[in-house]
Image (cartoon, grey):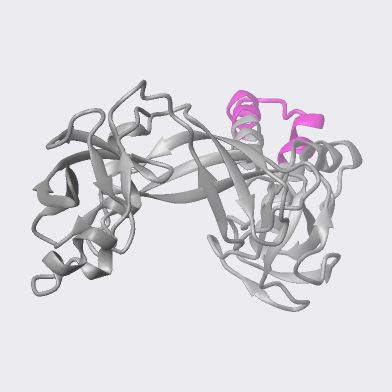
Amino acid sequence: IQTKFRGWIQDLFVNFVGMPVKQGQPLFTVYSQELLATQEELLLALNDLDRPMKGEFASTFNQFSVDLLRTAQRRLELWDVPASHIERVKKQRRSFKTLTICSPQAGVVLDKKAFEGMNVEPGMNVFSVADLSHVWVLADIYEHDIAFVHLDTEAKLSVISLPGKQFKGKITFIDYVVHTGTRTLKVRFECDNKDFVLKPGMYAVAQLKLNKGKALALPEEALIDTGTRKLVFVAKGAGHFEPREVQLGFKADNFYQVLGGLREGDEVVTSAQFLFDSESRLQALSTGGAHKMPGM
């Protein structure tokens, strides 16, 4: 909330951050020499029009008064002076020393820089008021999951301070740039917050459930990721196992989509993976459990 003219705050009606305000509720009054002078110009033009001049220059003088009235009123409008205040000046035929600035919307005061006697300049943020009944939730989507999110995708949102409670949100914006440090993309969910339990600054988790159809699935615990290759140990029978490189797609819960390297029904080791190293692999193969490949 700003003023478009220079002035001084005279009265302050909202004096702390976090205070709820209603739409149209007075926040402060401001005295402005510019505002007062413009009101006087408007009254001068009105008074001149009330007693039109006669004679040779009457037409020119009356037109000047009309132009002055129009200019003064337009200047007040451009300063966002309420129409009710302008009509009050015209009706009562007097100027007012101060102008009351009201909240343009209902909400909560998130920032207050105002104090009585403070000098305000055009464009200076005096108050910040936000409607917290509808909030944004910003989420980080990993780079390999970007292809799965779209506008209007719905998600379940949960917060640490409200265990067991979930909120519904819908994606309304997807960023165009991936953050190079985290390899994530920002998406924005919009969520109703009528009871104001969601607070700005909270940490939230967004869970998206997408139906990607059926696919060959590999348990997460069966994967050995060397950094350059992704390997699994496949049971060959009679206690023998062989390492096999696999190509994986998306991850769903605790399973990876298998794009290559395995077939449905293959048995893979899912336990005692720490025993499979370059020196002890042959001795430890028989200790590993096996898992039959399911479909997702």
Picture coordinates of residue 274 (x, y %)?
26, 69
Residue at the image point whose x is 81% and y is 46% from the top: 195
Q: Is residue 203 visible?
A: yes
Picture coordinates of residue 203 (x, y %)?
57, 61
Dominant SS in magenta: helix
Residue 4 located left or right of residue 228: right
Q: Is residue 68 visible?
A: no
As for residue 55 lying within the magenta part, the answer is yes
Residue at the image point whose x is 69% and y is 77% from the top: 118
Up/down of 14 relative to 220, above or below:
below
| Residue that sits furthest to the right in the current view | 92
Q: Nearer the viewer, residue 96 or 114?
A: 114
Q: Nearer the viewer, residue 10 or 167?
A: 167
| Residue that sits furthest to the front in the current view | 238
Residue 67 located left or right of residue 233: right
Stretch of the chain drawn in magenta: 45-64
| Residue that sits furthest to the top in the current view | 213
As for residue 101 lying within the magenta part, the answer is no
Picture coordinates of residue 257 (x, y %)?
27, 35
Picture coordinates of residue 27 (x, y %)?
80, 59
Position of the N terminus, as image quadrant, is: bottom right
